[in-house]
Amino acid sequence: MAKSTKTPAGGKPETPRPRRAGDGADPGDSLRLDHDGMDAAGRPMPVFPDPTPLERHGPAWVIAMCNQKGGVGKTTSTINLGAALAEWGRRVLLVDFDPQGALSVGLGVSPHDLDRTVYNVLIESDVSADDVLLKTNTPGMDLLPSNIDLSAAEVQLVNEVAREQVLSRVLAPVLPDYDVVLIDCQPSLGLLTVNALTAADGVIIPLECEFFALRGVALLMQTIDKVRERLNPRLEVEGILATMFDPRTLHGREVLARVTEAFGDRVFHTVIGRTVRFPETTVVGEPITTYASSSAGARAYRELAKEVLAR
């Protein structure tokens, strides 16, 4: 099986390697997102237990990371939640289901150098997921990569029988090998996203703590309801994940308060703060849990993994 490299798409950057945790202060690392037993939204902060080791693995619980708005932290959350779950002993498969291939790039894979991707698994009957899987540099976490070829799948699947269930069929053979599958959806509500929702047991909605990010959530909830009614009755919203939160700004606090008021317990207690560490991890092609292991971002995703498993 092919093994991914840590070289970002386009080759190694000529700029010096970004600093590791401990090389300098990052204002985001010093932000406390909870205090006095309260979470960032002012709710009592539960203590989530450390996940217990598994005696056996599989079949996988499939989660779609979905929001039709771009730039809200879907890919960052997919990579780092997956890495944190792997740290807790879970076998994780990440599915790059966005033609931009950002998930693959974020794990050090150059999408343009790939001969076969998730596109080939969807379209070619003689190509299986096992043929395309890549091992990442995070033990216990594998990748089903993507590149721009996937953009053609939306058109080619239109005339397929049961076109919304193609991803479900191609993932089915590998589900016994994993505990969690995370699907990084493209920022749209097209056929690829419907495929991801049809294949999933649950949905996590990363939501930037910014006013305009709120506007599309109602439409996304309607789409999830329609998929549940017509295609996938087991589909549930696992939670809304507040991302890019800065407690020093009134705007960020107000947006988080409105999200919590509107969606209540569906909003995760764990909040992902804004930090310069996340762009740095994309350059080096590894999760924040290894790049800046003691940073606030790494701690937040480890806590999110515990909360997801507790739910």
Image: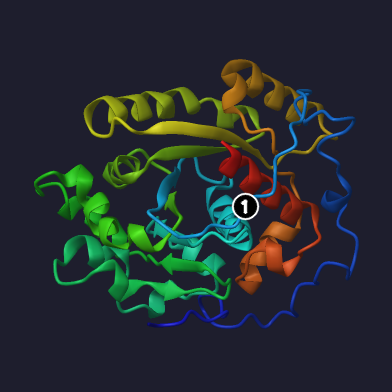
Q: Report which quarter residue 107 is drawn in.
A: bottom right
Q: Which residue is mark 1?
A: 52
Residue 273: where, in percent of width, then height?
A: 74, 44
Residue 304: where, in percent of width, then height?
A: 65, 45
User: For the N terminus, which image quadrant?
Assistant: bottom left
Q: Is residue 186 visible?
A: no
Q: Residue at x 29, y 57 (%)?
A: 171
Count of numbered marks: 1
Residue 165: where, in percent of width, then height?
A: 21, 46
Going by the numbered disc 1, the residue's amino acid type is Thr
User: For the C terminus, which image quadrant?
Assistant: top right
Q: Position of 203 compared to 168: left or right?
A: right
In the rendered view, how is the structure colored? Answer: rainbow
Q: Position of 115 compared to 28: left or right?
A: left
Q: Residue reaching furthest top?
A: 261
Query: How many other residues sit within 10 Å of disc 1, few (<14), some (14-19) or many (≥20)?
Result: few
- Location of residue 72 with respect to 60 vertically, above or below: above
Q: Report which quarter residue 99 is drawn in.
A: bottom left
Q: Position of 250 compared to 256: left or right?
A: right
Residue 54: where, in percent of width, then height?
A: 54, 57
Q: Residue at x 50, y 39 (%)?
A: 204
Q: Give the secondary structure at mark 1.
A: loop
The one of 65 and 46 positioned closer to us in this rendering: 46
Q: Is residue 190 visible?
A: yes
